[in-house]
Image (cartoon, rainbow, N blue to C red):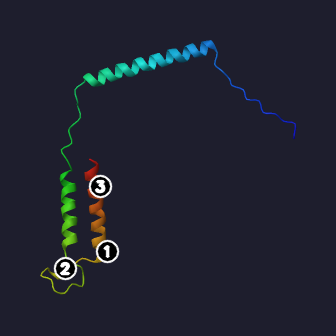
Amino acid sequence: ALGRKEVVATLLPSAKEQQKEEEEKRIKEHLTESLFFEQSFQPENRAVSSGPSLLTVFLGVVCIAALMLPTMGDVESLVPLYLHLSVNQKLVAAYILGLITMAILRT
């Protein structure tokens, strides 16, 4: 209606550019193959992970112990009053324990 027409045009590379691209592909393939062979024949230098660190395990045990302590307001408890934790303190301990669990499961 407006007198316009769309023309689809595709720009193709010249023969020289195609040869350059093919040569670059061959070089890249050769480099990746040589790198693969070099890596496959080299001995492993990485240290084997033996599990979570001692600090992580200690922090997890502290959080579990904090969650087992009585909450403030519990009257019938054999634990001294200064070891009673608030709900917010227990929430923080549970959050940290969750983070530690995720860190251990990812390794």
x, y percent for residue 38: 30, 21
Q: Secondary structure at mark 3?
A: helix
Q: Which mark is residue 82?
A: 2
Q: Secondary structure at mark 2?
A: helix
Q: Are marks 2 and 1 in contact (CB under 8 Å)?
A: no
Q: Which residue is mark 3?
A: 102
**For the residue marked with disc 3, what is the amino acid?**
Met
On the image, which quarter does residue 70 sit in?
A: bottom left
**For the residue marked with disc 2, what is the amino acid?**
Tyr
Compared with 21, 55 (above or below) is: below
Q: Is residue 52 left or right of residue 99?
A: left
On the image, which quarter does residue 30 sit in?
A: top left
Of the numbered discs 2 and 1, the one sitting upstream in the chain is 2
Q: Are marks 1 and 3 in contact (CB under 8 Å)?
A: no
Q: Which residue is mark 1?
A: 88
Residue at the image point whose x is 29% and y is 61% from the top: 98
